[in-house]
């Protein structure tokens, strides 16, 4: 995905828009161009509400007012046609807040271009109940389909509401049935037996850190047969913070990524027992690594870097699978009773499977948001983890939430 799609809309410039038009990004499921924006009549205000609800009820995306497109089957941007009324952004935001229920999550910006402006709106995919246009006599639901915004049928609306009600239960069911869970929750004696088989001394049991990223509003398997091939995902995991910046992909079926320098399914090095990633058909990404317990191994810089890289890679995989919706992200610690002096109050115990001692923090985020920068998600998880060691805030981030240590 081109980085302009991920850029904060308030940071867009006229040059960005010119590059956007020159790149000829076609209109589609997550992108819509509008030559003009007029809000004088009720029908015009209703049309704007429909466009936003349609994107929100699909997979979110970008809506650009002030861009003329051609008449092709997949319309391409043709030219920037600046809007001369610079006060339209506020009026549009008021229209959307009044006309949509529940309110859609969006960010709008007015970008000066030539003798006018282009209004750019990023709409987040709706999590939970679908967004209805309830103003201007509409009381209807819409969704984006290809290059069109269409009205949802009664059965589609009912299905969306039912899925929203059962989303949490389905997510828990999927997370508890993953193949990797059997590996994570197996008896410690199996690992100890393997160590003995390799002639290695039984170590103190080490905590297992996992990052789980699950598609929240996808109700079909993401890994369909046409995607089960060696080239379905990037062959290199480009780490952005850790020293080991490449991990090799090992197909087929689930995609397993070994840590740099690990030659077997599990390599017993000092401080490392498992380090791998798996991507499962229901739309769940999971990364795991064991660390030595105590300070600074578990809450240290290595874990912060690893969590950052795992989240960033996951954020790149989901668009490859055609998914841009909301994600539930978990940073979990298994064997927490041995690894952390005290359980932080903010850590979630609700999803703990029977007989497994782990704690975790859940945060929900859109694919685009996570792909743009996973740092806020990492920072929150690390803050809470450090609280388990009696420290209020993770020292690797400054007060503004930015990284604050030498790489």
Image (tube, rainbow, N blue to C red):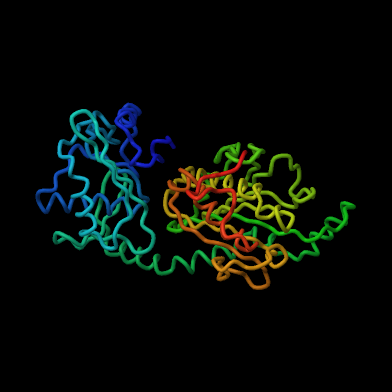
- Report which quarter residue 135 is drawn in: bottom left
Where residue 317 sits: x, y (%)? 52, 44
**In-image side of 42 versus 282 (left or right):** left
Q: Say left or right for 54 vs 250.
A: left
Q: How many marks?
A: 0
Kindly identify the residue that appears in the image at 35 percent across and 46 percent down: 61
What residue do we see at 48% from left, 42% from top?
A: 320
Seen from the viewer's position, the closer of residues 109 and 136 is 109
Relative vertical location of residue 332 with respect to residue 72 in this rendering, above or below: below
Image quarter of residue 95:
bottom left
Residue placed furthest toward the bottom: 354
Res 358 quadrant in image? bottom right
Q: Single out the residue that lies furthest toward the right.
A: 199
Residue 1 place in picture, x, y as percent = 44, 37
Q: Residue furthest left?
A: 41
Question: What x and y, as percent, mark residue 339?
Answer: 71, 62
Name the quadrant of the C terminus: top right
Residue 164 versus residue 298 in the image, above or below? below
Relative to 382, say whether 63 is above or below. Answer: above
137 relative to 30, above or below: below
Query: In the depicted view, which residue is nearer to us: 149 or 386?
Result: 386
Frontmost residue, 50 versus 246 = 246
Q: Picture coordinates of residue 381 (x, y %)?
A: 56, 57
């Amino acid at each position: 995905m081109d980085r302009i799609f991920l850029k904060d809309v308030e940071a867009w410039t006229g040059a960005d828009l010119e590059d956007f038009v020159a790149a000829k990004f076609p209109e589609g499921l997550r992108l819509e161009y509008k030559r003009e924006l007029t809000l004088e009549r009720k029908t015009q205000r209703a049309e704007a509400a429909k466009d936003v609800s349609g994107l929100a009820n699909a997979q979110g995306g970008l809506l650009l007012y002030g861009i003329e497109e051609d008449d092709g089957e997949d319309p391409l941007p043709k030219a920037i046609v600046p809007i001369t009324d610079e006060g339209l952004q506020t009026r549009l935001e008021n229209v959307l807040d009044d006309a949509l229920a529940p309110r859609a999550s969006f960010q709008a910006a007015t970008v000066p271009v030539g003798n006018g402006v282009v209004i750019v709106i990023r709409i987040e995919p709706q999590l939970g109940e679908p967004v209805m246009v309830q103003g201007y006599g509409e009381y209807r639901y819409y969704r984006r389909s290809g290059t069109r915004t269409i009205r949802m049928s009664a059965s589609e609306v009912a299905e969306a509401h039912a899925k929203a009600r059962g989303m949490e239960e389905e997510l828990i069911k999927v997370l508890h049935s993953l193949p990797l869970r059997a590996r994570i929750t197996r008896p410690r004696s199996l690992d100890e037996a393997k160590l003995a088989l390799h002639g290695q001394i039984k170590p103190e049991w080490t905590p297992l850190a996992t990052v789980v990223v699950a598609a929240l509003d996808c109700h079909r398997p993401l890994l369909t047969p046409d995607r089960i091939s060696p080239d379905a995902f990037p062959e290199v995991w480009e780490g952005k913070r850790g020293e080991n910046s490449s991990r090799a992909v090992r197909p087929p079926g689930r995609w397993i990524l070994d840590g740099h320098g690990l030659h077997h399914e599990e390599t017993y090095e000092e401080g490392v027992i498992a380090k791998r990633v798996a991507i499962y058909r229901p739309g769940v990404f999971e990364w795991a690594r064991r660390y030595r317990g105590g300070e600074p191994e578990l809450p240290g810089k290595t874990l912060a870097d690893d969590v950052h890289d795992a989240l960033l890679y996951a954020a790149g995989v989901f668009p490859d699978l055609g998914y841009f919706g909301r994600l539930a992200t978990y940073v979990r610690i298994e064997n927490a009773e041995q690894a952390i002096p005290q359980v932080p109050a903010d850590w979630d115990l609700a999803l703990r499977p029977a007989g497994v001692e782990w704690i975790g923090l859940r945060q929900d985020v859109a694919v685009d948001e996570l792909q743009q920068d996973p740092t806020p998600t990492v920072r929150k998880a690390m803050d809470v983890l450090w609280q388990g060691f009696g420290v209020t805030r993770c020292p690797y981030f400054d007060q503004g939430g930015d990284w604050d240590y030498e790489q």
